[in-house]
Image: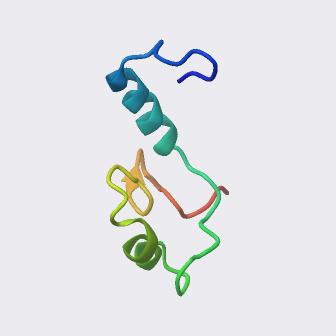
Amino acid sequence: MPLGKGGSLSDQQAWDVAAYVNSHERPQDPRLVEGSVEKTRDKFHANDGVNLYGQTVDGVLIGQGIR
């Protein structure tokens, strides 16, 4: 990371970039369970480690979908 320049970021810098990208809203998960972001997180995202799906970041529920 970045593409074509492997090794140009430290492991920590790469994790920081990934966390930054992961903390921004994205389209809703098409596997939405019973219309609930929380149930979808429990079923598909709870064991992903650093996944922010279903958590509130800067006042936005990640996974609610882009408005």
Q: Position of residue 63 (x, y in %)?
A: 53, 61
Given residues 41 and 10, the one toward you in this image is 10
Given residues 52 and 6, the one toward you in this image is 6
Is 39 situated above or below 65? below
Left or right: 63, with 52 as reference point: right
Q: Position of residue 26 (x, y in %)?
A: 61, 52
Q: Position of residue 47 (x, y in %)?
A: 33, 64
Q: Residue furthest bottom?
A: 34
Given residues 56 and 42, the one toward you in this image is 42
Is 1 situated above or below 18? above
Q: How is the image coloured?
A: rainbow
Query: Where is residue 5, by image quadrant?
Result: top right
The tally of labels here is 0
Is 13 situated above or below 54? above
Q: Position of residue 3 (x, y in %)?
A: 62, 23
Which quarter of the image is occupied by the C terminus?
Answer: bottom right
Residue appearing at x 38%, y 32% in the figure:
15
Residue appearing at x 40%, y 53% in the figure:
52
Left or right: 3, with 60 as reference point: right
Left or right: 47, with 3 as reference point: left
Residue appearing at x 35%, y 66% in the figure:
46
